[in-house]
Amino acid sequence: MSGSRSKARKRAVDFLYEADLRETDAVTLMSDRIGAPETAPVPDYTITLVEGVNENRERIDELLTQHIEGWTLSRMPVVDRAVLRLGLYELLWCPKGDVPPVVAVDEAVELARALSTDDSPRFVNGVLGRLAGIRDRLRKALPKEETPVD
């Protein structure tokens, strides 16, 4: 995970994870940190991801709930939940050519490998791989106002 987008994803997962733990809004948490002397500059792509996940969180959680097998969102590790939310946002809401599905899944798997349990990469790969396989159908089913501009 060396690229600037990979680092931006890691920062986004950090914000999503902390907001989930604190049961607070991720965008508010991030906004409070931006510009604070103790906070490193926040990449634009991190802001895009946190805002996108936050804005589409209800639909993201519905889709994850429908496609995780043997788990509930509330039962899974908080970091896995953050990684899955970010990965699914990139799969469905980023403009088509911006983040290829394989990249969205691979990056999420790498985040799970770096940040979570030994079983998490396989779990994240399975869930996002299933969703990537039906990506076009899922994107077509999004309400018009949620459909990414391609």
Image (cartoon, rainbow, N blue to C red):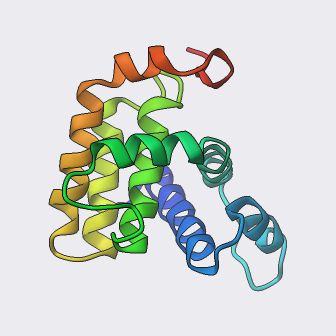
Residue at x 69%, y 20% (from the top left corner): 145
Count of numbered tags:
0
User: In the displayed structure, does residue 123 sit left or right of residue 86?
Assistant: left
Q: Residue at x 53, y 31 (%)?
A: 93
Residue 143: horizontal and vertical position, in percent? 60, 19
Q: Is residue 51 above or below residue 149?
A: below
Q: Position of residue 63 (x, y in %)?
A: 41, 40
Instruction: Give the quadrant of residue 109.
Output: bottom left
In the depicted structure, whether residue 138 falls above or below residue 56: above
Quarter of the rendering occupied by the N terminus: bottom left
Drawn side of residue 72 relative to residue 143, left or right: left
Q: Give the residue displayed 74% in from the left and 70% down from the top.
A: 29
- What residue occupies the far bottom of the structure in this picture? 38
Of residues 79 and 73, which is closer to you in this image? 73
Q: Where is residue 136 in the image (x, y as percent from the top left)?
A: 36, 17
In this rendered view, identify the residue nearer to me: 141 or 16: 141
Residue 11's place in the image compared with 89, above or below, is below
Answer left or right for 96 relative to 18.
left
Q: Where is residue 97 in the image (x, y as percent from the top left)?
A: 45, 21
Specify the quadrant that holds the C terminus.
Answer: top right
Q: Would you identify the image quadrant in which residue 111 lies?
A: bottom left
Residue at 82 percent of width and 83 percent of height: 37
